[in-house]
Image (cartoon, rainbow, N blue to C red):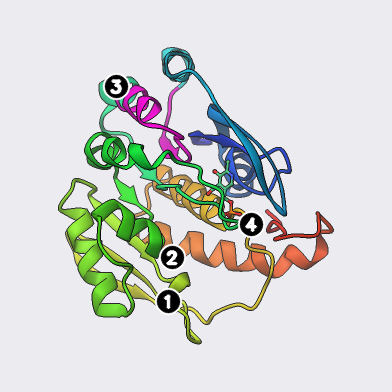
């Protein structure tokens, strides 16, 4: 049976990140993708020029209509733009506990544009973190959620993953891509303990939307019954292949997308 995965996230009209990346990742991982929009962005591979948030009540209504009709096997939450949307999403998902939820706490685009009102970090932390089966921050996002300095080494990464897990998510994946150095280690903290995933750093410009694609692929794996550790490992292996394939694309002159 093909699994149905719902993304609740923002739009990237140039197709590399946000909802567009999520839907491509869902298809690439053999699932049926659905999308509730939280915000429109005007952007290309060079950057974001404008953001237009969807009214929170309309975000809730989209979620209500999907659940009223379709079996949802997993949810991925990406850009939520502001505190009111975070609250609307949390309220709309509240009756649907028991479905895996992957939360990618999108804050700042690679070009530096803010995709989350800084005043919304509190609502994200108090309302959405407790709903998450799996939280997928990068290092700046982990630090911002905790109100701490960015981790500079592996022990600090692991400590922040544990402190984030104490805020509600069942599992936390902290992505170490911003650590610098030859490796790009990720750490998973769950009830089973700590798992490190080692990967060599890939020298590429084609990193636009990698976070979106990874969290979507994890949601697809969880819907299929994988454990969190298996889901992350499978999604990372797939994303590495997609980054390898990105050279076949010719999309824009900035940070290019991966090939889903
Ligand atoms: N635009 C939207 C709508 C997103 O959800 C995201 C996701 O993180 C981005 C842009 C970020 O893109 P980038 O990977 O270039 O930082």
Q: Earlier in the sequence, mark 1 or mark 4?
A: 1
Magenta stretch bounds: 71-90
In front: 98, or 62? 62
Question: Is there any visible trace of residue 100 in the rendered image?
Answer: no
Pointer 4: residues within 10 angstroms few (<14), some, or many (20+)? Answer: many
Q: Which residue is mark 3?
A: 91
Which is nearer the N-term, disc 3 or disc 4? 3
Residue labelled with disc 1? 179
Badge 3 crowding class, 10 Å Cα cut-off, few under 14, some 14 to 19, many 20 or more, is: some
| Residue 89 position in % (x across, y down) | 37, 26
Compared with 139, 166 (above or below) is above
In the rendered image, residue 101 lying in the magenta stretch gets the answer: no
Mark number displayed over residue 233: 2
Mark closest to the chain's N terminus, 1 or 2: 1
Mark 2 or mark 4, which is nearer the start of the sequence?
Answer: 4
Query: Disc 2 versus disc 3: distance between alpha carbons?
Result: 31 Å
Left or right of 250 in this view: 132: left
Q: CA distance from mark 3 to mark 4?
A: 30 Å
Give the spatial CA distance, label 1 vs label 3.
Answer: 35 Å
Residue 115 pos. (x, y %)? 50, 42
Q: Nearer the viewer, mark 4 or mark 2?
A: 4
Distance from disc 1 to disc 2, alpha carbons, whole Å, reads: 19 Å
Crowding at mark 1 (Cα within 10 Å: few <14, some 14-19, many 20+): some
Provide the residue designation for mark 4.
Answer: 208
The quarter of the picture where residue 24 lies is: top right
Q: Are marks 4 and 2 in contact (CB under 8 Å)?
A: no
For mark 2, give the secondary structure.
helix
């Amino acid at each position: 049976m093909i699994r149905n995965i719902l993304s609740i996230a923002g739009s990237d009209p140039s197709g590399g990140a946000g909802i567009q990346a999520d839907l491509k990742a869902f298809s690439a991982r053999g699932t049926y993708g659905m999308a509730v929009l939280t915000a429109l962005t005007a952007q290309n591979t060079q950057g974001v020029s404008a953001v237009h948030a969807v009214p929170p009540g309309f975000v809730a209504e989209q979620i209500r209509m999907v659940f009223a009709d379709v079996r949802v096997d997993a949810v991925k939450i990406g850009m939520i733009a502001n505190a009111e949307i975070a609250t609307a999403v949390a309220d709309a998902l509240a009756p649907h506990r028991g479905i895996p939820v992957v939360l990618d706490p999108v804050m700042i685009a690679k070009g530096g544009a803010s995709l989350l009102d800084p005043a919304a970090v509190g609502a994200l932390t108090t309302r959405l973190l407790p709903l998450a089966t799996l939280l997928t921050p990068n290092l700046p996002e982990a630090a911002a959620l905790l109100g701490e300095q960015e981790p500079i080494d592996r022990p600090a990464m692991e400590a922040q993953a544990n402190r984030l897990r104490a805020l509600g998510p069942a599992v936390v994946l902290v992505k170490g891509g911003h650590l610098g150095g030859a490796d790009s280690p990720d750490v998973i903290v769950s009830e089973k303990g700590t798992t490190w995933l080692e990967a060599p750093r890939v020298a590429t410009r084609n990193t636009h939307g990698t976070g979106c694609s990874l969290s979507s692929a994890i949601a697809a794996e969880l819907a299929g019954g994988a454990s969190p550790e298996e889901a992350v490992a499978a999604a990372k292996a797939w994303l590495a292949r997609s980054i390898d394939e990105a050279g076949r694309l010719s999309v824009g002159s900035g940070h290019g997308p991966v090939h889903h």
